[in-house]
Image (cartoon, rainbow, N blue to C red):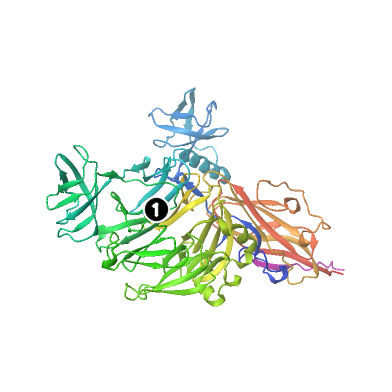
Amino acid sequence: MPQSFAKVNYELIQLKGGLDEITPTLALAAGAARGALNFSCSPFGGYERIAGYERYDGRPSPSNATYQVLWFNFFVGTTSVGAQVTNQAAQTATVIAIGADYIVISKTSAPFAIGNVVRDTHGTIGTVSLPLSQIASKASAQFQAAASDLYRADIAAPSGDGACLGVVMYKDKVYSFRATTGVVRLFVASSSGWVQVPFLYEIRFKLGTTLPTEGSILTQGGVTAIIRRVITQTGAWAGTAAGRLIIELPIGGNFVAGAATTPSSTMTLIAAESVITMGGGGKFEFRIANFHGNASTIRLYGADGVNRAFEFDGNVFAPIETGATVDKPKHILSHKNRLFVTQGSSLMYSVAGDPNNWQAAQFAGEIAVGDNITGIETLPGAQTTSTMIVTTRSNTYMLYGTSNDNFNLVSFNTGSGALDYSIQNMAQTHLFDEKGVISLQTTLNFGNFDQAALTFNIEKFIAQKRNRVSYSVLDRQRSQYRVFFNDGYGLYLTILNGQWIGTMPVFYPSPVYMAYEDKFSTGEEASFFASSDGFVYQMDKGSSFDGKAIDAYITLNFDSVKSPRILKRFRKCAIDITGGGYCNVTFGYKLGYDSSRISQDMSVSYERNMRIPKWDSFVWDNFSWDGKLIEPTECEMSGTAENVALTFSSSTNYIQPYIINTAIIHYTPRRGIR
């Protein structure tokens, strides 16, 4: 009589939806996550282990480091990791790994060739031969990480103490701000690291007759200085102009109050020159704008809530004075050819086309909002209608109009606002308020109710972090809004074509203090963040968190395979994973709501340094791949229960990002639960 075999069925799980802490199990898709860290929702499906970040100062990127394997027929083996080696051509390199019959070198002045005799300080190591075997993919990934560590050691933080206060890309250069004993300094990244950009001097004048040319000489007796910027604040260049000159270090002594000349004009100096200084303790916000219409007049504008706002052209740093009694703008925006800044509950704007002119007589102005302003931003696609969003912690306003004649501040949503530095524009405007991340469109639909938040399904996480918001930034390539908290945690929200795809939490060992994203002139997108540890880091670079392992995991929702009261015997799981190199992922599962009454096989060892709850309840197996694409990986399963929750994790500093797309569970239906 033929033997009867139980039929094997298959359940396809599409990993999507992101983290959900509150939806009931049976109402939630099997591919949604109940726990997650350092994964994000891929825009087109699947969960992606996030890319790393690495320190930056303009020197060679750690992730771009190269290495070379030197094989030896007769290997002495007396060298050590970190040793300097040379060959007969006086080429140098550093040893980063040692094998049974090879060494791995990096930072080579030139590639070593077959036949080279290699030496270190102890003597001859051997003669380079043809490769004796292939290097395994895992070892290759580890060599790349070791080479990255070697280059990483050269990269320093901007000189100073405390947090790095700001980082910005401007004219294909990266600049940073950091304080030393309370005095802020400006740095530019270079091939030799951070280089300080010196602040110049400013001197006040009145009764100017003719506008001086920038680059001309200011003269008073035997004292001279080169004029680098002319800032007109009041009056006209017909004998009544007053303002400030930004000058280089005077030669011949110091200027004093009294008459002075330039080749084209006369003026009266009000006092001696003073060096431009900035105090520490702020957090920078930047805008790039062009108020004068020439390619050469694209300039950087910034504010930090502690000092005067400023204008910078790559050479000349010029403070901006609004005329406020306490002149310490916090938020800044170029909108309709005016510079807007916020100070407390006041929204101030300059004369059209002149960010240094704040005279009410020339139609600069001020609007009282009624509460401390937490952000300002021009709405997407609003250049013709000239709409600006203005937020406080509890309310949202819209500023309509183009000038003093028609500016109109209108309440948009009472009870829903934004936290400082959280507003970002994608297809819609997104921000973080006390309910979580929202879009303006959802507030139109839901008002100030919690359901307006895109992060409503992770309200426990939001409740813990809402008072820790540090900064936000976009990743345009991955279509993500990212918000970071001052304890190192963050959220990646994937939003494609205006539709929310999902939210996942991340954890950076180096907390984000301030962040900035833009494109280089080559079209390459880049995101940087200034950290509370003082370093500048580039996001989405490398296989590690600046050399540290990326601890990442996902625990999926319990899948009842469409039959919540039917027991199933689970046999196998086929996982579809894509990536760009070697990968090693730990696969696990929990049976029957993680019931203690069900035997959970503990025969395979597992790592313990991950942030996964209830490690002792998982069944573990390991798999790895080589190459960019892979057929589904077959993972064995065993056990009988009414449902199962899958878990994926990894924890190394050498695995590149990978995407877990789908999982297919092989199972056999059994009896119903009595």
Residue pictured at 72% horizontal, 57% vertical = 589
Q: Is residue 402 magenta?
A: no
Q: 347 left or right of 296?
A: right
Q: Nearer the viewer, residue 172 or 228?
A: 228
- Where residue 543 appears, as percent x and y from the top left, is 53, 48
Magenta range is 1-13
Residue picked out by circle 1: 168
Question: Above or below — where is 582 with respect to 143?
Answer: below
Q: Quadrant of the C terminus?
A: bottom right
Residue pictured at 44% horizontal, 68% vertical = 369
- Where residue 446 appears, as percent x and y from the top left, is 57, 75
Q: 236 left or right of 138?
A: left
Amino acid at pointer 1: Val
Q: Name the image quarter holding residue 643.
A: bottom right
**How many numbered circles are shown?**
1
Q: Does the magenta stretch include residue 7?
A: yes
